[in-house]
Image (tube, rainbow, N blue to C red):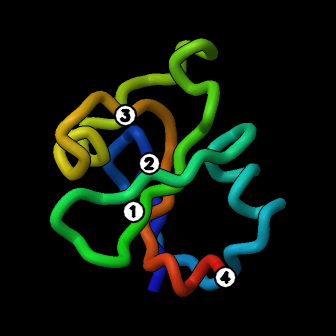
Amino acid sequence: MAKIIRCDKTTENIDNLDLETLQIIVEGYIEELIVPNEKGTVMIVNEDGIMLNLPLNTVATAIMGQPIVGNVILCSRKELH
C-alpha cells in the first residue's frame, strides 16, 4: 500500500494514486524518483519543490540519501500503472 510521508513526519496510507491526487499531495507537478536499494519502489515528489522553497522532509531525505523537500508518496511502481 502506498504511503504519504509529510514534512511534519506524519504518515498516512493511501489507495487512490490518480494524477490529480498525487499533485494535490505534493502540491504541484510530480516527479518519480527510484528509491535506492528498494527494487520496484518509487518516491513521488514535487518536481519544483526546491524552487518553491518547500520545507525539508527529513524522513524522505533519510530514505533517499539526498535532500527531499515537501510531502511525498512512497509506493511500488506497479501501484502507479
Q: Which label's residue is closer to the chain start, 2 or 4?
A: 2
Q: Which label's residue is closer to the chain start, 1 or 4?
A: 1
Camera-near label (1 vs 4) is 4
Task: Please state which of residues 28 and 36 is positioned toward the viewer in this rendering.
Answer: 36
Q: Is residue 32 left or right of residue 1?
A: right
Residue under numbered circle 3: 68
Query: Real-space Cα distance between discs 2 and 4?
Result: 23 Å
Type of amino acid under label 3: Ile
The correct choice, above or below, for 50 with respect to 72 in the image is above
Report the residue at 30% width, 59% height from top.
35
Residue under numbered circle 2: 6
Residue under numbered circle 4: 81
Numbered circles on residues, count: 4
Q: Is residue 14 left or right of residue 40?
A: right
Q: Are marks 1 and 4 in contact (CB under 8 Å)?
A: no
**Within 10 angstroms of label 4, few (less than 14), some, or many (20 or more) residues?**
few
Residue under numbered circle 1: 11
The picture quadrant where one finds residue 53 is: top right
Q: Secondary structure at mark 2?
A: loop
Q: Secondary structure at mark 1?
A: strand
Residue 75 x %, y % = 45, 73
Q: Are marks 2 and 1 in contact (CB under 8 Å)?
A: yes
Q: Which label's residue is closer to the chain start, 2 or 1?
A: 2
**Within 10 angstroms of label 2, few (less than 14), some, or many (20 or more) residues?**
many
Q: Which label's residue is closer to the chain start, 3 or 4?
A: 3
